[in-house]
């Protein structure tokens, strides 16, 4: 039954995650944390942070890890397969259709209409993580400082996102734990 639930959860992520990895993250959270309770919010945040530091698509990395955690190696294979199966099937079908009808207005409109939806989903996820950082021990002041410093580093100083993530991970590692 675990494998069936893994397949269903990540198949839904694969089929509904239109727009790539960033749009899939809230869907993975809904399935793994909300519906099946394989993780809590803090564990999900840790997996997301670590997954973002590694190369490759985030949805498949998260599926592989969560599947492994729930049902071992076969769980990882099941979850990863379920994540990519809809994409492979839809790519073959949709690319054939879109190439035939790419000049029609409704096709162009459908593609443009997805962008704001993905933007809202990412904003909601960012707001959730902001609240978790604020209430999870960092406090409002430190959360805002890290947010602004990250924004300046990415936009003004043009620091590579991977370097920023690595630096913040290093900062988290060397930071003394206040809860002990």
Image (cartoon, rainbow, N blue to C red):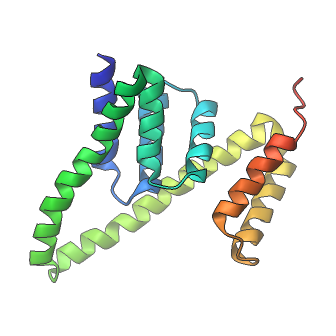
Of the pair 167 and 179, the residue shown nearer to us: 167
Farthest top residue?
Answer: 1
Horizontal and vertical percent position of residue 89:
17, 52
Residue 178 placement, left or right of 72? right
Please determine whether, in this image, residue 165 is positioned above or below residue 63: below
Please determine whether, in this image, residue 22 is positioned above or below residue 129: below
Of the pair 110 and 25, the residue shown nearer to us: 25
Horizontal and vertical percent position of residue 157:
76, 77
Horizontal and vertical percent position of residue 77:
34, 33
Residue 120 placement, left or right of 42? left
Visible residue check, residue 36: no
The quadrant of the picture occupied by the C terminus is top right
Residue at (43, 47) in percent of width and height: 59
Of the pair 171 and 10, the residue shown nearer to us: 171
Visible residue check, residue 60: yes
Residue at (63, 38) in percent of width and height: 46
Toward which corner of the image does residue 144 lie, by quadrant?
bottom right
Residue 155 placement, left or right of 64? right
């Amino acid at each position: 039954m675990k494998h069936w639930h893994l397949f269903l959860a990540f198949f839904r992520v694969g089929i509904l995650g239109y727009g790539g990895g960033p749009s899939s993250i809230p869907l993975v959270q809904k399935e793994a944390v909300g519906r099946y309770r394989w993780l809590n919010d803090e564990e999900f945040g840790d997996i997301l942070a670590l997954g973002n530091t590694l190369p490759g698509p985030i949805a498949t990395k998260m599926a592989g890890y969560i599947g492994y955690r729930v049902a071992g190696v076969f769980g990882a294979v099941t979850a990863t397969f379920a994540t990519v199966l809809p994409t492979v099937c839809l790519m073959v079908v949709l690319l054939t259709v879109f190439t035939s009808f790419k000049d029609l207005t409704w096709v162009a409109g459908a593609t443009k209409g997805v962008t704001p939806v993905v933007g809202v989903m990412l904003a909601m996820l960012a707001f959730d993580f902001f609240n978790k950082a604020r209430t999870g021990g960092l406090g409002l002041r430190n959360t805002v400082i890290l947010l602004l410093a990250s924004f300046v580093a990415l936009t003004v100083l043009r620091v590579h996102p991977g370097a920023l993530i690595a630096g913040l991970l290093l900062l988290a590692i060397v930071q003394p734990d206040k809860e002990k």
